[in-house]
Every structure is written in C-alpha cells, then in structure tokens.
Amino acid sequence: MSGHRRAPVVFALAIVAVASLLPLSARCEDRFINVALVDPVQIFNHDVTIRGLRLNLIYGVNHGMYGLDLGLANRVTGEAKGLQYGFVNMVDGPFTGWQDGAVNLTKGKFTGLGTGVYNGFHDAEGLVWGFINVTDHMSGLQLGFVNYTRTLYGLQIGLLNIVKNKEKLPVLPIVNWSF
C-alpha cells in the first residue's frame, strides 16, 4: 500500500488514539477544536460542544457548535451559532448565523443567512437564498427559483412562490408577499 493510500487510515487511527487517551470527564466539557473523519471517529465524541473550529472530513456530529464548522457533512444535535459551511449542513436545534452548502436543514429556529441549492428550515427569520427554499414559517426574504412556506411575514422572489396559508393569491410567479 502506498503512502497516499495509507494516509486516511493512519489519520483515523491517530484520532482514535488521541481520543482514547483523554479522561472521560474531559470528553463531557466544551472544547475549542474538533476533527472528525466520520462519527464516531473524531477527537471528541458527539456529546461535546465545540466553541471554536470543527473540521469534518466526511461526517461529524457534536451536541453544540459555536464558531466555524467546516466539512463535507456537518451535524449539530443541539444549538449552533456561527458559520456552517459544507456540502450538507444539519442542525436539530436552533441556528443563528450563516449556513452555506448544497443542502441546509435546521429543525429549530433559523436566524440569519441561508445559502444553498436546497434550504429546509422550520422557522426562519432573515434571508434564505437558494434554488429551492422550503420553510414552515418565514419572516424576511426568500429568494430562489422555488419558494414555499406555510406562513409568511415578508417577501418571496422567484419563478414559483407559494404561501400555503395565504387566503388570496397563495401561488404567484416572480413575487409573493404577506405582511
């Protein structure tokens, strides 16, 4: 096996070795940095909150994330604040900041800027800009080719704009609004 092919395996083993040397009590506290190959092969386990930088080479999971979250697939099971940048970004709790990726999903309240091909947010406040934007509740601006929300306090701009609970003109091309 050449050195280039062994590098990911060696890296994964190094992460596991470093994490196994840490005392259990240290794994339950907030940490400044985390590096993950794929959960659970990451420096700190998924119950830890990261306040600083998280690098997810394939898929990383942590309870909380405050700061810069980079990777292929980023998941936070609690609250996240900061910049989440990856191919797929997922937050189970509330998110404040900027989510940028091909797919952005937030189950809790989303506050800030969401940019991606597909943005799926439960309760969004701010600017949601993508090819397809789907929210349950939107307060602010949805900008995309297809915009969908159940309730809107703001503006939608796109080819197809849908506000499901709007009594008059719930589906409009180019622009839709509700104030």
Image (tube, helix red, strand yellow):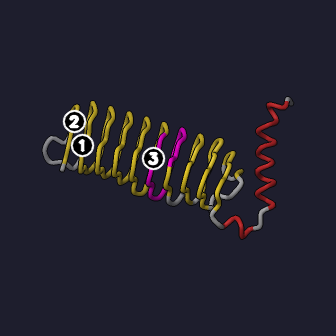
Of marks 2 and 3, the one in the foreground: 3
Q: Is residue 158 above or below residue 155?
A: above
Q: Are marks 1 and 2 in contact (CB under 8 Å)?
A: yes
The residue depicted at 55 percent of the width and 53 percent of the height is 67
Amino acid on which the number 1 mark rests in the picture: Leu
**103 horizontally vs 6: left or right:** left
Q: Earlier in the sequence, mark 3 or mark 1?
A: 3
In 3D space, how far apart are the residues under numbered discs 2 and 3 (Cα atoms)? Answer: 24 Å
Name of the residue lying farthest toward the bottom:
25
Where is residue 30? Give x, y as percent.
63, 64
* Element type at mark 1: strand
- Tell me, for residue 98, which label it has, or none: 3
* Element type at mark 2: strand
In 3D space, how far apart are the residues under numbered discs 1 and 2 (Cα atoms)? Answer: 7 Å
Query: What's drawn in magenta, residue-wise?
Result: 83-100
Q: Is residue 104 above or below residue 44?
A: above
